[in-house]
Image: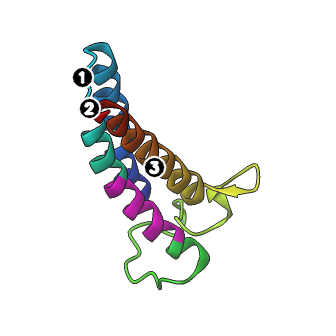
């Protein structure tokens, strides 16, 4: 379930930042920062669930369905929530740098 929330922030980033590049909009980074902060918050919460810092109260998945906290969340030994958190942090930092360059 949390993976869907992360996608709700990541997929619009590709469209918004892509259109910002296409139209050469110097302020498109503002939207990138906003979406990266929201997606980073969800990824951080998902990482807390994965490592066990946050107890999972709601069980939306059945016993046969996927879980957000088991070993299915690993790609090459790296948890998907950690990869998402790193991606949102990098996108947010690059978006902030793009705004800083336009002010000078």
Principal SS element in the magenta part? helix
Earlier-in-chain disc, 1 versus 3: 1
Q: Residue at x 35, y 23 (%)?
A: 18
Label 2, label 3: how far apart the Cα atoms are? 16 Å
Residue at the spot of label 3: 88
Q: Residue at x 27, y 50 (%)?
A: 34
In the depicted view, which residue is nearer to us: 38 or 55? Answer: 38
Residue at the spot of label 2: 28
Label 2, label 1: how far apart the Cα atoms are? 6 Å
- Which quadrant would the N terminus be assigned to in this image? bottom left
Earlier-in-chain disc, 2 versus 3: 2
Q: Secondary structure at mark 3?
A: helix
- Residue 30 lies left or right of residue 49; in this view the side is left
46 magenta-colored: yes
- Residue 88 lies left or right of residue 82; in this view the side is left
Q: How many marks?
A: 3
Per the rendered image, the range of residues in magenta is 37-47
- Image marks 2 and 1: residues in contact by CB distance under 8 Å: yes
Mark linked to residue 25: 1
- Which quadrant would the C terminus be assigned to in this image? top left
- Residue 5 lies left or right of residue 56; in this view the side is left
Residue 55: where, in percent of width, then height? 47, 85
């Amino acid at each position: 379930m949390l993976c869907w929330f992360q996608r709700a922030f990541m997929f619009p980033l590709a469209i918004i930042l892509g259109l910002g590049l296409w139209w050469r909009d110097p302020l498109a980074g503002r939207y990138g920062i906003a979406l990266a902060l929201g997606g980073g918050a969800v990824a951080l919460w998902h990482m807390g669930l994965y490592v066990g810092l946050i107890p999972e109260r709601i069980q939306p998945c059945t016993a046969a369905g996927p879980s957000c906290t088991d070993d299915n969340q690993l790609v090459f030994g790296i948890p998907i929530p950690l990869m998402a958190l790193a991606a949102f942090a990098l996108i947010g930092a690059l978006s902030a740098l793009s705004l800083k360059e336009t002010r000078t």
